[in-house]
Image (spheres, grey):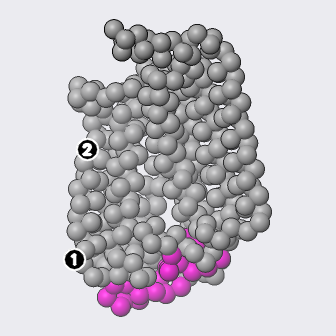
């Protein structure tokens, strides 16, 4: 499954405009990480815009590539893609502006006019991003895109992305301690309502992601769900590439089955991280119950993969398995 220049030109244009803007933000925020010493909760003010920019580049480019491939309700799909693009630009734009101002974008309840207006738009944007992705996921159920493996990967990937965005609604309510006051990058007080952590205050998280190392963090399943589609499509690309050398992978049915195994295993991890976060447990400090769930998921996924490969190999005649090798020997002898 290759991508030509002419195909790139046919990608959803509003989404590609959003992707280009996010790529510029990644560059600007990357420079800011190096040259700007201002911090919020011991993290560079540019860390959040940088991470959001990278995330929206990946997800936006995937949507821009996928939507033109759909054959049903194309106008509706184009509109949903445009809604996602505009909403993404506004939301991440607010995050970037708040970072430049040296203050918080999420959970900030300060009463200055810009923050109050921005928070209203920001809150509505979450619904827009979630709603557009959910409708695209539903409409994908009624049409096929290419071979079965690709169709399954897109359906499952968009569905998990929508659920991952839905997790964001619970992040706001993760704190049961009520409002608290923190300082912005200039030492000014900021009144916050809500937090990312479950059972622990925000701050002092992992490098790069800043996910909590002390308690639960719903940003973990949010991230895993949002980028499921890239993982699934990559799996399809790998299986398709290997099919040129592996005889039993040339069956569309086998590639679809193996893609289903990848989807099952990844979904299991997604569900486990939600369960882990809601129990107030850090990703890096799993308890026995979490290890058991992970082990069971790994065992089931590996078993299904082995059974699928074994069945596929049995369906290929012995002569077919070695035909490629005989052709290569013949060419060398000639």
Q: Which of 236 and 62 is in front in this view?
A: 236
SS category of the residue bearing label 2: helix
* Secondary structure that dominates the magenta span: loop
Which quadrant is the N terminus positioned in? Answer: top left
Residue 80, position as x, y percentages in the image: 42, 37
Return the residue nearer the eye: 178 or 288.
288
Q: Nearer the viewer, residue 254 or 178?
A: 254
Q: Which residue is drawn at 41% across and 46% down?
A: 59
For the question of whether residue 17 can be seen, the reply is: yes
Answer above or below: position of 281 versus 14: below
Look at 49% across and 43% down and name the residue there: 231
Give neighbour class at mark 2: few <14, some 14-19, many 20+ (Cα, 10 Å): some
The image position of residue 247, as x and y in percent, is 53, 19
Which tag is nearer the camera, tag 2 or tag 1?
Answer: 1
244 up-or-down from 219: above or below: above
Q: Residue 65's quadrant in the figure?
A: top left
Tag 1, which secondary structure?
helix
**Residue 163 in magenta stretch:** no
Q: In which quarter of the image is residue 37?
A: bottom left
Q: Is any part of residue 114 visible from this angle? A: no
Q: Where is residue 253 in the image (x, y as percent from the top left)?
A: 60, 20
Q: Do the residues labelled 2 and 1 touch (CB within 8 Å)?
A: no
Q: Mark 1 points at which residue?
A: 35
Residue ID for mark 2: 17
Residue occupying image coordinates x 56% and y 30%:
152
- Percent from the top left, x then y, of residue 239? 50, 30
| Badge 1 density bin: few <14, some 14–19, many ≥20, Cα 10 Å | few
Highlighted range, magenta: 180-205
């Amino acid at each position: 499954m290759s991508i030509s220049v002419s195909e790139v030109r046919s990608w959803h244009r509003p989404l590609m405009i959003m992707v280009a803007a996010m790529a510029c933000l990644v560059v600007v925020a990357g420079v800011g990480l190096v040259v700007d010493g201002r911090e919020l909760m011991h993290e560079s003010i540019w860390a959040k815009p940088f991470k959001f920019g990278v995330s929206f580049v990946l997800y936006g480019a995937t949507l821009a590539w996928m939507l033109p491939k759909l054959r049903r309700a194309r106008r509706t799909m184009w509109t949903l893609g445009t809604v996602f693009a505009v909403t993404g630009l506004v939301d991440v734009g607010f995050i970037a502006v708040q970072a430049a101002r040296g203050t918080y974008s999420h959970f900030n309840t300060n009463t200055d006019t810009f923050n109050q207006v921005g928070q209203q738009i920001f809150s509505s944007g979450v619904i827009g991003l979630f709603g557009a992705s959910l409708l695209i996921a539903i409409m994908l159920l009624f049409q096929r895109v290419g071979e079965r493996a690709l169709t399954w990967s897109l359906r499952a990937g968009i569905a998990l992305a929508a659920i991952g965005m839905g997790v964001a609604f619970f992040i706001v309510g993760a704190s049961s301690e009520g409002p608290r006051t923190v300082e912005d990058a200039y030492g000014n007080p900021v009144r916050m309502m809500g937090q990312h952590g479950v059972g622990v205050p925000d701050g002092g998280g992992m490098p790069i992601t800043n996910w909590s190392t002390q308690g639960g963090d719903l940003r973990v399943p949010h991230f895993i769900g949002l980028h499921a589609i890239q993982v699934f499509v990559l799996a399809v690309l790998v299986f398709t590439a290997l099919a040129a050398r592996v005889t039993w992978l040339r069956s569309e049915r086998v590639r679809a089955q193996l893609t289903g195994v990848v989807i099952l295993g990844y979904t299991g991890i997604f569900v486990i991280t939600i369960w882990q976060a809601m129990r107030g447990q850090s990703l890096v400090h799993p308890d026995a119950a979490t290890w058991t769930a992970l082990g069971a998921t790994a065992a089931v996924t590996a078993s299904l993969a082995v059974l699928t490969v074994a069945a596929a190999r049995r369906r290929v005649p012995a002569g077919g398995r070695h035909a490629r090798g005989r052709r290569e020997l013949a060419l060398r002898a000639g």
